[in-house]
Image (cartoon, helix red, strand yellow):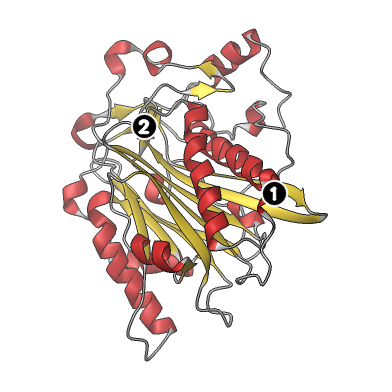
Amino acid sequence: MEQVPRRARDLGITVGELPTGPLNAITDVAGVTVGHTTIDDGADLHTGVTAVVPRQLGAGHRSLPAAVYVGNGYGKLVGSTQVDELGVLESPIVLTATLSVFRAADALLTYLMDRHPGGVSFNPLVGETNDAHLSDIRRRPVTERHVLDAVRSASPGPPAEGCVGAGTGTSALGFKAGIGTSSRRVGVGGSPYTVGALVQSNFSGVLTVRGVPMPAAELVPHGDRTEPVGNSCMIIVATDAPVDARQLGRLARRAVFAMSRVGAAYTHGSGDYAIAFTTTPPPRQPLPDGLIDPLFAAVLDAVEESLLNSLFMAVTTVGVRGRIQHAVPHQQVLRRLAATGRLSAPA
């Protein structure tokens, strides 16, 4: 019987000691919404679109403070240089497959032009990972309608995880992966803030859960396992803390660092990117640097748990040319964690 997808925390795997938001998702940051469009024909197409849409954009604000950190630039992150240069986010953030990123950017441009009649310059921000191992990527099935549907359907509720949207055909650490999300709540200078993360996992390495290696070669039958050719990771971090673009760059760096906690190999072909933004307009006085350590801790924990959720919520998938990518076998992981005393009580 195929296992039921379950989040890491529901399996008794707790990352860090900081409390989560009520949804344990990026949507715990007020105003941040998530939408998906999934393209899955059960055979050759396993792909889609995921959109992170801050509602503060368009509510009297054309931009929000933001930063991009490039862990390894083997990827296509459309619009990143202007974010780097100006330190602002001007559009929803869209994730999709590598060869669909340019069509997605054009579709997002349509959305921005509709929102701002008369504008003559826009900066759509679109990232990707390569899902060619399970999906016929050269067919480029993502259309303008798929992108607009994901953006316009974005909601503040619990985002779907695993094999959905831009994570429908992705793999990580030798297993089927996808979309994952998590959040943390922290106090800084006497004020409460929320940090949320969402990931599109598609990278190589050896899965590590709470410091315990879980090699795919040991957990999945040898004759029934295939390895993806491409690998990358897109990470989105949102917060409501009053931080500026420079400080958001520091948060984005920690997001990529968090990949090492789950066993990322950071290989030559892995395009590893983090985008961080705040829903608070540019503050007159950003938080002092000496006070933002709790935000760093929140990013590290939220990204680590997001990555685990992207794996534990995925299901075994048979893709193009009969390639198969297995879901992480929950019970085998739990047995190994229990043997080392690193398993909490399930939520």
- Crowd rating for badge 1 (residues with CA inside 10 Å; few <14, some 14–19, many 20+): few
Q: In the rendering, at what x and y percent does residue 245 appear?
A: 53, 62
Percent across and percent down for residue 7 are 59, 35
Task: Report the residue at 40% width, 65% height from top.
Answer: 85
Quadrant housing residue 315: top left
Which quadrant is home to the C terminus?
Answer: top right
Q: Secondary structure at mark 1?
A: helix
For residue 39, say whether it is visible.
Answer: no
- Picture coordinates of residue 69, whole percent (x, y): 43, 50
Q: In the image, which disc is placed on residue 290?
A: 1
Q: Depth check: 125 or 80 in front?
A: 80
- Tell me which label, 2 or 1, sits earlier in the chain: 2
Q: Position of residue 265 (x, y in %)?
A: 38, 27
- Residue drawn at 47 percent across, 65 percent down: 87
Q: Residues within 10 Å of mark 2 (few under 14, many from 20)?
A: many
Q: Which mark is residue 266?
A: 2
| Circle 1: residue type | Gly
In the displayed structure, 324 sits above or below 81; it is above
Residue depicted at 27% across the width and 31% down the height:
228
Determine the secondary structure under disc 2: loop
